[in-house]
Image (cartoon, grey):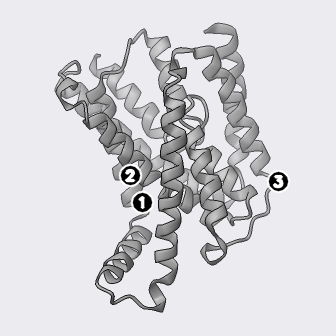
């Protein structure tokens, strides 16, 4: 993998990981277009680290509140002010368990080997984003319960299918289940943290196989590109969620999906 290929893949990862257009689907298409075989495991690990850093830093205020409440709970020094954050932590854990069960089952299918299927899933994602325009959720964290965590956990697990956007599908599911736009976006990315961390741990199990298939300069270029464009795309996405404009990405996904069905 050359430096420019790595940087382009990093840009695509950084943008599509957060913008609801499916990072896994775009990496499949980019690999096909650029003639790259399997992406080396170490490179995939590096991109996951960049993604995790972006989410943690962007939502650091809420994450620090949750960690603080957990610390006080462990010391049996928690109070009423910790109730919301402790409840939110429990919901994230419920969603994570379901994501792991569904995601591991779906990942056995190796659907990334079929570009035309990925292209069709782009169209499915576009339909989900359009449907989000008609949701009128108003629940804040005090009104979110186990039902919401179960729904989002299952949907996040299904989003391992290349072409299905994790952020787009979970945010849409949150909105349709009654959660407000602001909380839908934040909750979607809070449940992504353990999911991304879990994927990273699974990849690191094969540490001995990581190898050096990608030159250090190319690795660094891909990491930097993913980090920078990840911050920019997440900032844009949050603004569009609050404005109820997720549907705008369907304008891109529909022609992309149709092109993929015809050309790949």
Do the residues under discs 3 and 2 have CB atoms within 8 angstroms?
Answer: no
Q: CA distance from mark 3 to mark 2?
A: 29 Å
Say whether disc 1 or disc 3 marks the residue closer to the N-terminus. 1
Classify 229 as above or below 184: above
Residue highlighted by disc 3: 134
Q: Are marks 1 and 2 in contact (CB under 8 Å)?
A: yes
Marks 1 & 3, CB-CB < 8 Å contact: no
Q: Badge 1 is on which residue? A: 58
Helix or strand or loop: what does disc 3 sit on?
loop
Mark 1, other Cα within 10 Å: few <14 / some 14–19 / many ≥20: some
Whether residue 49 sits left or right of residue 91 in the image: it is: left
Q: Residue 130: x and y, percent?
A: 77, 43
- Residue displayed at 49% across by 12% down: 33
Camera-side residue of 9 and 79: 79
The numbered mark at residue 3 is: none
Q: Is residue 73 left or right of residue 211?
A: right
Mark 2 lies on residue: 54
Residue 46's quadrant in the figure? top left
């Amino acid at each position: 993998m050359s430096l420019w290929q790595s940087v382009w893949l990093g840009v695509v990862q950084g943008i599509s990981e957060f913008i609801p257009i499916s990072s896994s689907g775009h990496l499949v298409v980019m690999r096909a277009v650029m003639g790259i075989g399997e992406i080396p495991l170490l490179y995939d690990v590096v991109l996951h680290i960049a993604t995790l850093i972006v989410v943690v830093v962007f939502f650091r205020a809420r994450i620090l509140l949750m960690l603080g409440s957990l610390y006080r709970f462990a010391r049996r020094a928690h109070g009423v002010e910790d109730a919301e954050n402790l409840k939110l932590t429990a919901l994230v854990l419920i969603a994570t368990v379901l994501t792991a069960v569904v995601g591991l089952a779906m990942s056995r299918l190796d659907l990334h080997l079929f570009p035309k299927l990925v292209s069709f899933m782009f169209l499915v994602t576009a339909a989900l984003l359009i449907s989000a325009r008609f949701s009128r959720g108003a629940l804040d964290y005090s009104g979110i319960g186990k039902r919401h965590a179960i729904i989002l956990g299952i949907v996040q697990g299904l989003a391992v299918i290349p072409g299905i956007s994790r952020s787009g599908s979970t945010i849409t599911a949150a909105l349709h289940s009654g959660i407000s736009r602001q909380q839908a976006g934040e909750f979607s990315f809070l449940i992504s943290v353990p999911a991304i961390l879990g994927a990273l741990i699974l990849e690191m199990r094969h540490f001995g196989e990581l190898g050096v298939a990608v030159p250090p300069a190319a690795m660094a270029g891909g990491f930097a590109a993913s980090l920078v464009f990840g911050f920019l795309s997440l900032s844009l996405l949050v603004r569009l969620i609050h404005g109820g404009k997720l549907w705008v990405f369907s304008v891109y996904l529909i022609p992309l999906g149709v092109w993929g069905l015809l050309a790949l």
